[in-house]
Image: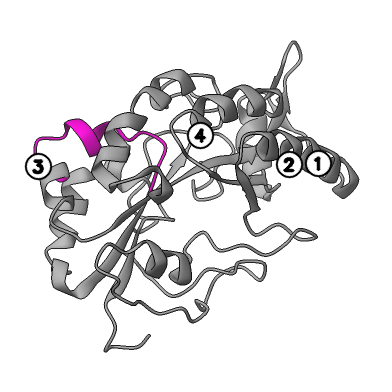
């Protein structure tokens, strides 16, 4: 990473710092003063603390640019996402989040992952919710959506089996069929669809240095070089992630690959 350029902070791919560790987030930012930071890229499923925490919002406002990846899968409050608010409640936070970032162009909606799971009596599937959530999100001027399908890691299968669920995987043809339907909905709403690290789909950049440079209110420049150490299909540019897998996310999502397997 070019030490002459201001850095992009990722907070965080590894755990939901906003939802679960706001005090750690605040403390960690002391290591990265605003003048050295180009953008803080925030990843969260529960943005409550971005608005109502007694300290975090004022700390973040000291930085020149915030970009939020807001995950809304439609599964909040179900057994698959037991400690996430219902999607309608999360969407209600959008006006305040837009004020915090300075505009809807600095918020990306993550419909991620797409999940199909079933037990002996019922099936959970969030794909049918895409269109209704997309319409609700687009009303606020958000035009970027990022998506992927749940990855069938062994520990994910085992965790879900312990709860009596089977994670169903789709063939590439089935994924393409769903992608076509989502693309039609997105296009009708003026929304662009991106696929996050999905083999057989166009490579995208969740952290996109070129986009962050374009959006930066002071036109500061960050690195646009490809990040190292990410998955092969990931096109993200360079950043520093300030979260750790040891900061165990408290959301309890059954399909999460970052959640360790319980013995």
Q: Marks 3/4: CA distance?
A: 27 Å
Q: Marks 2/1: CA distance?
A: 5 Å
User: Which secondary structure, mark 3?
Assistant: loop
Counting residues from the start of the chain, the first of labels 2 and 4 encountered is 2
Task: Please give the name of the residue rendered at 29% of the width and 83% of the height, measured from the top-left corner.
Answer: 5
Q: Which residue is mark 1?
A: 180
Q: Which residue is mark 3?
A: 55
Counting residues from the start of the chain, the first of labels 3 and 2 encountered is 3
Counting residues from the start of the chain, the first of labels 3 and 1 encountered is 3
Q: Marks 2/4: CA distance?
A: 26 Å
Q: Are marks 4 and 1 in contact (CB under 8 Å)?
A: no
Which image quadrant for residue 50? top left
**What range of the chain is rendered magenta?**
43-56
Q: Which residue is mark 2?
A: 183
Q: Which residue is mark 4?
A: 253
* Residue 255 to residue 172: above or below: above
Q: Position of residue 238 (x, y in %)?
A: 43, 75
* Residue 33 to residue 194: above or below: below
Counting residues from the start of the chain, the first of labels 3 and 4 encountered is 3
Query: Going by the image, does 58 lie left or right of 133?
Result: left
Q: Marks 3/2: CA distance?
A: 39 Å
């Amino acid at each position: 990473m070019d030490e002459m350029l201001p850095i992009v902070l990722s907070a965080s791919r590894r755990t939901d710092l906003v939802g679960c560790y706001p005090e750690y987030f605040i403390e960690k930012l002391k290591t990265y003063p605003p003048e050295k930071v180009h953008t803080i890229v925030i990843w969260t499923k529960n943005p409550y603390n971005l608005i109502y925490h007694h300290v975090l919002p004022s700390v973040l406002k000291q930085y020149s640019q915030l970009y939020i990846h807001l995950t809304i899968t439609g599964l909040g409050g179900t057994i698959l996402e037991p400690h996430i608010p219902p999607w309608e409640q999360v969407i209600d936070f959008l006006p305040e989040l837009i004020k915090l970032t300075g505009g809807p162009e600095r918020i990306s909606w993550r419909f991620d992952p797409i999940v199909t799971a079933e037990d002996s009596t019922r099936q959970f599937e969030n794909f049918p919710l895409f269109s209704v959530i997309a319409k609700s999100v687009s009303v606020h001027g958000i035009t970027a959506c990022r998506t992927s399908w749940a990855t069938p890691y062994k520990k994910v299968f085992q965790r879900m089996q312990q709860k009596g669920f089977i994670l169903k995987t789709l063939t590439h043809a089935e994924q393409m069929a769903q992608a076509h339907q989502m693309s039609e909905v997105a296009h009708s709403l003026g929304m662009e669809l991106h696929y996050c690290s999905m083999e057989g789909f166009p490579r995208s950049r969740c952290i996109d240095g070129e986009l962050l440079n374009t959006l930066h209110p002071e036109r500061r420049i960050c690195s646009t070089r490809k990040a190292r150490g990410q998955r092969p299909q990931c096109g993200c540019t360079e950043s520093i992630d300030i979260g750790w897998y040891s900061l165990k996310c408290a959301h309890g999502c059954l399909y999460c690959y970052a959640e360790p397997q319980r013995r």
